[in-house]
Amino acid sequence: MPPSPSRADASSPDQAALDAESGKTKVNWKAIALVAAGIALTSAGHYFTPSGLLMWHGVFQRLYYLPVVFAAITFGWVGGLAAAAAAGVAYTPHIMITWSGMHHYAMEQYAEIFMFFAVGVLTGILADRERKRRIELQHTAQRLSAVYRELQSSFEQVKRADRLSAIGQLAAGLAHEIRNPLASIDGAAELLDAAGDQPELRKETVTIIRKECARLNRLLTSLLDFARPRRPEWRDVELAKVLDTVIDLVGHSAGKGIRFHKQEDERLPGLLGDQEQLTQVILNLTLNAAQAMPEGGDVWLIARREANGLAIQIRDEGAGIPEEHMDKIFDPFFTTKETGTGLGLSVVHQIVTQHGGNVNVSRNEDRGTTFTLFFPQTRGSAA
């Protein structure tokens, strides 16, 4: 909201107009005194200058315009008209006394007085229009400022509601993910209690308990990675080494029929980041790509130069992500896998954001999905 005018600004034309419009009529005596002084001094110049100095009389005659224009700007057309009348009243006796013997010259002086009126009224009308427009702009600015404050307040409320909603979804998802392994552990404990001397049954139930405990441990580890991400250790990343490492790791655990390919531009922009975290991101996405193709297919890891940075793509030939799930896949605990925690892509999104980049997902034209990681350029091209 624009600051309220101070006492020192109370004599400004805009403030006078604002006060008049709000019903607070204030007489701007300082401006009136300046106008009166200007007319008086100019008239004195006329009366005390010898009639033979026509050039100086011409100068004083034009000086009347200054108080007339000032009054018009300050008080509008009424002020300009009043100042012109005052100038005319002050100047007319001088014309009648000094130039009575020069009829032609005297008529020119009377005509100049009419110009005082014309200039005062015209300047006042233009000043009134400008003042009115400025007042409207000030009122509009005040209304916009009020609307902006309301929007800010609403935005803060929405953010608070959104945070509470996110916490609720996180708690609900966590409770759901914990409940299933706890139920399995509870059932296994009952079987173990009833197993007696049946070693095979006891071994089977212990295996179930260990499996579900490991599942809970993975869930909590993923949750901690999401809730308290480690700060990146900034170094120059060897991207080719990262891609080779990911392909080696996934190649040993991927199913049969899955082929991995790497494609790089010859000169890639440098990438500054945490090599371990970026390896985790690309490994997670590559594992997802491999798991999306149970019957086999090709997975492409592509690194290419962009106009203002570096793009890394992981493209598969799987069934693809349904359109209705596209805007949810980065949400915590959202998963379409039976054994997934729903935190993998959330951690991916968080790490990429920490590195100043962004991650997008799109469906391929033929089949499969492409995840694209973009990082703005941070240093010169790699050799």
Image: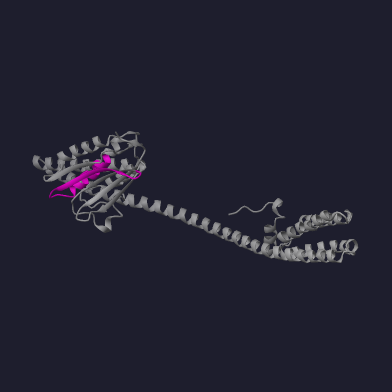
Judged left or right of residue 235, residue 253 is left
- The image quadrant that residue 221 belongs to is top left
Tell me the quadrant of the picture where the C terminus can be found: top left
Q: Which segment did they paint magenta?
A: 280-308
- The image quadrant that residue 328 belongs to is bottom left
Residue in view at x 70 percent, y 55 percent: 12
Percent x, y of residue 254: 15, 43
Residue in view at x 23 percent, y 49 percent: 180
- The image quadrant that residue 277 belongs to is top left
Percent x, y of residue 374: 32, 45
Percent x, y of residue 102: 87, 64
Residue 97 or residue 17, whichever sits in front:
97
Judged left or right of residue 7, residue 306 is left
Judged left or right of residue 77, residue 315 is left
**Magenta segment: does it hold 156?**
no
Residue in view at x 89 percent, y 61 percent: 98
**Magenta segment: does it hold 290?**
yes
Can residue 273 be seen in the rendering of this structure? no
Residue 74 or residue 116, whichever sits in front:
116
Compared with 300, 117 (above or below) is below
Can residue 298 be seen in the rendering of this structure? yes
Tell me the quadrant of the picture where the N terminus can be found: bottom right
